Image (cartoon, rainbow, N blue to C red):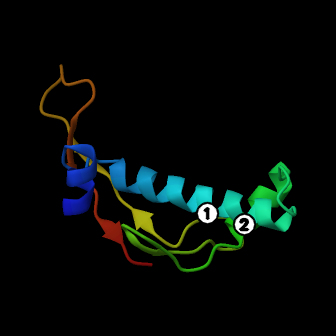
């Protein structure tokens, strides 16, 4: 989180780490798909194949893999608190990583 703040000038937000890891994982999968296509523009299916084949990708939130349904093994629970009837969006409270 210290490196994130140094790079972007602010603390990690509610969705910053998941978005950061997802983007880096996708870029890595696209790179593998380009390699698989011999340096040519890969097809969508080639990219999907490479991304879904990702195992133990080391990101800011930990190691990430995908199951047969395409779901990540990392589970996040996002909690909001509504402080009153006029609080339309709620206030972000926490986003713990759930194991399993």
Which residue is drawn at the image coordinates 19% and 35% (left, top)? 82
Which residue is drawn at the image coordinates 85% and 53% (left, top)? 40
Which residue is drawn at the image coordinates 78% and 66% (left, top)? 35
Asked which quadrant contains residue 8, the reply is top left
| Residue 39 position within the rendered picture, expressed as x and y whole percent measured from the top left | 82, 59
State how far apart marks 1 and 2 are (Cα): 6 Å
Mark seen at residue 28 = 1
Res. 1 in view: no
Question: For the N terminus, which image quadrant?
Answer: bottom left
Is disc 1 in contact with disc 2, using a CB cutoff of under 8 Å? yes
Query: Dot 2 lies on which element?
Result: helix
Disc 2: which residue: 32
| Residue 86 position within the rendered picture, expressed as x and y whole percent measured from the top left | 18, 19
Question: For the C terminus, which image quadrant?
Answer: bottom left
Camera-nearest residue between 20 and 75: 20
Vertical side of 6 occupied by 37: above or below: below
Near mark 2 (Cα within 10 A), the count class, few <14, some 14-19 or many ≥20, is some
| Residue 51 position within the rendered picture, expressed as x and y whole percent measured from the top left | 68, 64
């Amino acid at each position: 989180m210290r490196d994130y703040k140094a790079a972007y000038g602010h603390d990690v937000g509610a969705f910053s780490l998941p978005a950061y890891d997802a983007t880096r994982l996708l870029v890595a999968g696209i790179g593998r798909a380009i390699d698989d296509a011999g340096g040519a523009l890969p097809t969508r299916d080639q990219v999907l194949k490479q991304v879904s084949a990702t195992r133990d990708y080391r990101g800011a939130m930990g190691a990430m893999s995908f199951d047969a349904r395409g779901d990540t093994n990392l589970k996040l629970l996002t909690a909001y608190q509504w402080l009153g009837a006029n609080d339309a969006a709620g206030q972000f409270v926490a986003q713990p990583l759930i194991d399993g």
